[in-house]
Amino acid sequence: MRQIRCQLAMSLDGFIAGPKGEADWIETDPQIDFSTIYQRYDTLLVGRKTFLTAPSAFCMPGMKTFVLSRTLRQSDYPKVTILADDCEKKIADLRAAKSQKDIWLFGGGKLFRSLLDANLVDAVEVAISPVMLGEGIRLLEPPGMRAKLKLTSHKIYPSGIVGLEYAVA
Amino acid sequence: MRQIRCQLAMSLDGFIAGPKGEADWIETDPQIDFSTIYQRYDTLLVGRKTFLTAPSAFCMPGMKTFVLSRTLRQSDYPKVTILADDCEKKIADLRAAKSQKDIWLFGGGKLFRSLLDANLVDAVEVAISPVMLGEGIRLLEPPGMRAKLKLTSHKIYPSGIVGLEYAVA
């Protein structure tokens, strides 16, 4: 079965964005090969807030984008699919659908928490930037169960970014 | 000058203890050489709450222990030194004192935040256990400034623990 993978940039203290959604703290590194990352996926899951920061950026060629939102209207965003209800069932169906490619869960916080609690996340892959934010949007929202992980790979980049890949146990 | 180093175990999502101070999630690894870690230090800084979880454990041979607390009485804890006021000045003096060994800041949360904001932390060293806690005591309490770091070393352990060492920029 294809995987649902939460793949994100993170600060050392566990934030995926600043308090206002800021991404300006994310270190860049020429050795991070985004085209290889993109090629792994054909489906993108994103929450409403993250999507609205840059709607057109989430419509990539070869990628089907699903936005989880109870308030956005499908007719306003024809290039994506709005998931308003029954999301877990629909996402489980996406995972069960035949494809050589994986599903990119692009978002932490509440979305990650709800899918994790529904046993719908297979892997977590973070690129830890060398910074502590102190506040912001967390990788995983409380409350909820602990999640055991298994480290499956790692890579250290010249910029000091630490890439860690885990399977959800 | 000797360094003040915040050295801790952490979950992937940035917690150093569970909501009730739990440490049962911390992965152990026979390759982590605690005696080498201890030998680096001759001084330990710890907050009241952490200290009270196991007072005798924080009194180690060859280590001077300083507990930051406005409520504990020195006479009740003769083996340690209680720092009740003027802490930043006293800790700056400890750092400036001549010694071949470093100062172990054993605690995150508020204590780490206050010393970081006072430019009294030189390095951060975390051993990331393969788990997400979702809630608990954070590496760094809000509010506060971002802190830029510089990755200075890393080590991957067979247990999946990731050891990362940073200089505070």
Image (cartoon, coloured by chain):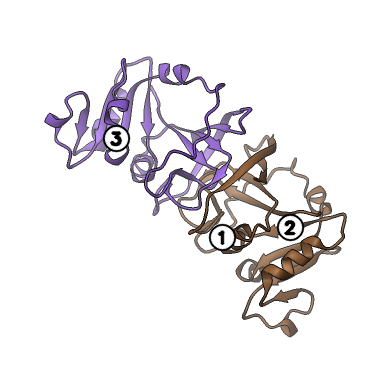
Chain colours: A purple, B brown
Q: Quadrant of residue A157?
A: top right
Q: Quadrant of residue B73?
A: bottom right
Q: Is residue B129 visible?
A: yes
* Residue count near mark 2 (Cα–Cα under 10 Å), binned few <14, some 14–19, many ≥20: many
What residue sits 54% from the left and 44% below the top?
B12
What residue sits 76% from the left and 74% below the top?
B81
The label shown at residue B109 is 1
Query: Badge 2 is on which residue?
Result: B104
Vertically, is A103 above or below B95? above
Chain letter of disc 1 in the image? B
* Residue count near mark 3 (Cα–Cα under 10 Å), binned few <14, some 14–19, many ≥20: many
Question: Which amino acid, by three-letter code, is at mark 2?
Answer: Trp
Query: Badge 3 is on which residue?
Result: A51
Asked if residue A127 lies left or right of residue B45, the reply is left
Which badge, 1 or 2, comes first in the chain's sequence? 2
The label shown at residue A129 is none
